[in-house]
Image: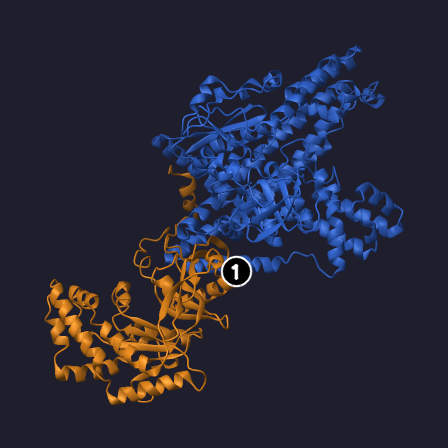
Amino acid sequence: MDSGGHIAWFEAIGLADREQVGGKGGSLGELKRAGIAVPAGFVLRTAAFERFLESLEQQAPVRAAVAALDGDDLEAITACSAALRQRIESAPLTADVLGELSAAHATLLGAGVPQPVAVRSSATTEDSADASFAGLQDTYLWVTDAAQMLARVRSCWASLYSVPSISYRLRHGLPEERVAMAVVVQIMVDAGVAGVMFTRSPTTGDRSVVTIEAAWGLGSAVVGGEVTPDHWVLGKITGEISVREVSAKLIQHVPLAGGGIEAVAVAEERRRAACLDDAQLQELRTLARRVERHYGSAQDIEWALDRHSGAILLLQSRPETVWSSRDAAPIAEPQQDPRMHLMSVFGTRR
Amino acid sequence: MMRPGSTHPARAGAGAETATIDTQTPKGAFPAPSSLKVAAGTERAQAAYPYYMQFTAADDARFWFYNSMHFPEPMSAFDMVTAEAAYCALGSSVTRVHCLPTTLGIDYRIINGRVYIGGNAVTDPAEIARRTVEFQQRAFYYYENWERLYTQWREKMLVLIRDAQALPAPVLPEFEPLANVHAGRGIAANHTLLETYQKSLEGYFRMWHHHFEFLLLGYGAYMAFFAFCKKAFPEITDQTVARMVAGIDAEIFRPDEELRRLARRAVELRVDAEFQEGRTPGAIMASLATRGEPGQVWLEELATSRDPWFNINVGDGFYHYHRSWNDDLTMPFSGLPGYIAQIKAGASLKRPIEALQAQRRQLIQDYRELLGSDAERAAYDQMITLAHRVFPYVEGHKFYCEHWYTNLFFNKVREFGQLLAANGFFADTEDVFQLTHYEVESAIIDLMTSWSNGSPPRGPAHWPQIVRERRAAIAEWAKHTTPPALGPVPDVIDDPAIVMLWGITRESLDAWLHAGSEEASNELRGFAASSGVVEGPACVVKSVEEIARVRQGDILVCQITNPTWAPIFQKIAGAVSDIGGSMSHAAIVAREFGLPAVVGTGTATSRIRNGQRIRVDGGRGVVTILS
């Protein structure tokens, strides 16, 4: 599975490993196993966080400090958060973790030109609770060198102790000792276009359509709601495109040379141009169907289109929760006499 | 012709620059019938329609809509027989035979040649309950015994058709044939005229009863499945549901298949060079007759195809001038050069029936898998099974009723027109269709009397002026648009017959009320009949005579799309029609040819000019005029 026990490559993991690799990491591994193209990468397992926390706890309590907080005392939470984050971000990694992480990073980049990576939080609580929790942890895009990568891993860990994260756990009574975080390190897709897609209609819950939203540049602009994306609705089975809404896409996220990303204005002539063509939409639909079939449930998927190769890569897939939780009584029950179905047309006044 | 539950924003079609719409109409209501004026100078033509079709003051309290789907053009006095016979039969089926619980039959009125119809809902719960008991003893029996009754139906229709074919041509010899006298027949030839006419009329009314014998039940099963799909998959397109239900080998595909067969035979017999674009059917057939045995063989093959498969009208069969392929070979022959070229290029032209069936099965299976539970899947299975069982009737009946029989009937009336014209009643055979069916009978009796007493008939001094007046009235009415609906807007449209047959819903009424703004834009909306987007020059075809103008790559813009037009689908890049639903056969043919199509736009042939560039988005049901 890995060299020293703290690293897990996507190929070797799946959803069942969520306890050790977090929701995001498990999902990426699962996709990879299903034969779906995801950018290469690995997960720094929760054990690494535990090792790190252990050494912190030896200096001063961490978990106990949080557990002792009053969920309504925002001032205390804020002070505690600042102190803990500062400690996490400045403490050195344990030697074994540092070695494994640096080696894995080097393996990931290979011998070629240096490639930027994304460093993403992958919390174990991610899909146990509601999806909104997932948004509370940080993701760092376009991380260009090993030193930055190492710093960002600690930033991800630190995000577990952000004010909203702590408040959330206190409010929901989530025990501190069960809180752990894995970190995903994966090759960053230089996206020409990126976006999200849902295998159920977000508006009607229809399972027979795929809704696709996309904008120019990196997907963070779409996910973060900084741009009004183009919007399509495709028949999941038929491929018919029933809705096409091309929006004015005013900004896009692009990489910064020294690492990180920035929002820039989209060139005038591209703003109102559709950012995907029909063939790409169909390719996305096919992918959406494969992912959904693999999981056996409706999915909310992030994807990016590599601007050099044109390939579509999946960045994340998580179960759709809104409509799935609403499914209640069946639309119709089988009838002992099938002709009774006709009474819905002939027999009642609507 | 089917548009189950779909909104139809465009049928407002008509609403434009007309002077007939009362602009004082309050919001939320259509003009009252009494505010609709008979066009100046056409009052006598309007009065010719029977009294029971005329609007009265009492009609103002009710909601009416213009049946532009079946009667898109002003109706001549005779053609109203189709409305009479059809509504009489539809109403019988709904009200008295199958006893639909929530509705009675359809009322109809005519003004300015336009047919308005209104539903007749049952609202009393006790009455609905009483009718439900009746319905389940009647309609359910039909569902239970569908195959047997449908087989029996076909036999009845063939008998009816044979009876109509057996009616003698109306002739008046100078003297009664000697043989009749010696046989002691005792009835003279003039009486046979009356007998033949009345039998023709009787047969036509009878045919419409058979037309509606199964129709609503067939639609109902489709509607139940349709409603289920719309609930389970709120964003599913009408055409997808249509594809799951539509038959693959329905009778209505047969005429076009015969044409493909004839194209194949022409190549096999090496007479294909005769079929040149622009050559008339007469010239081709005359030339083939001189080509020895191969030419003869092909002509015999043609004769086999013609009876019965060319008994198909170029329209919906509701107007006397919707002639059949048999009456005018222009349409079928216009398709032959293209088919021949394809065969010579190696195409088989055989419809891939099995592949199409497999596709349909797959589609049904794929949607089935998406359902939320096994209970839903079981209900889905029951409903699609029922729809498949009954839908062949919905698809098959038109060939026998609206095409074959209607054509026989109008041609028989035409024979009377010819006899009356020969006796000076009319300048032209077709003038007979300007008389109501009562008036035709009176003209026949006039002629019978004249033959019997040796005096000249009175008709020649009576009818020509009236015919002129009525022709002028039709021309005048055709210039005006008419409101899509009249009277107060109902809160809900829940008459299953109206929803099923006309696809009218509360949403479509709202769209009609707000129509007009649409006229200013360059967009037309209709039913998304077949997906895909295409741009090209519009070829606006208003009658079958213009078919020859359609060029490779044109987008066909026509009033009614009809399976008889299939031969030209091989040439075109897309299709747009004024009338038709997502289940219309043209929509099915377009899907099979993979052509983008928008049907039921209401106004395409009047708003799009020939040669204009247009864009057809068949997935969204939008046509855009680009130039």
Name the spot of residue B129 as percent of width and height, x first. Answer: 36, 34
Image point (44%, 74%), residue name: A37
- Going by the image, does A215 lie left or right of B274? left
- What's the colour of chain B in the image? blue
- Few, some or many C-alpha atoms within 10 Å of disc 1 (few <14, some 14-19, many ≥20)? few
- From this view, report whether residue B371 is shown above or below residue B327: below
**Which residue corresponds to mark 1?**
A278
> Quick one: B239 or B547, which is closer to the camera?
B547
Q: Hey, which quadrant is residue B186 in on the image?
A: top right
Name the spot of residue B125 as percent of width and height, x first. Answer: 34, 32
> Quick one: B491 or B121, which is closer to the camera?
B491
Image point (40%, 29%), residue name: B27
- Going by the image, does B518 lie left or right of B553? left
Asked whether residue B601 appears in the rendered view, the answer is yes
> Quick one: B514 or B300, which is closer to the camera?
B514
Query: To which chain does the residue with label 1 belong?
Result: A
- From this view, report whether residue B571 is shown above or below residue B330: below
Asked whether residue B261 appears in the rendered view, the answer is no
- Going by the image, does B514 lie left or right of B524? left
- For label 1, the SS is helix
Q: Hey, which quadrant is residue A348 in on the image?
A: top left
Name the spot of residue B569 as percent of width and height, x first. Answer: 66, 49
> Quick one: A148 or A188, which is closer to the camera?
A148
Image point (64%, 48%), residue name: B253
- What's the colour of chain A in the image? orange
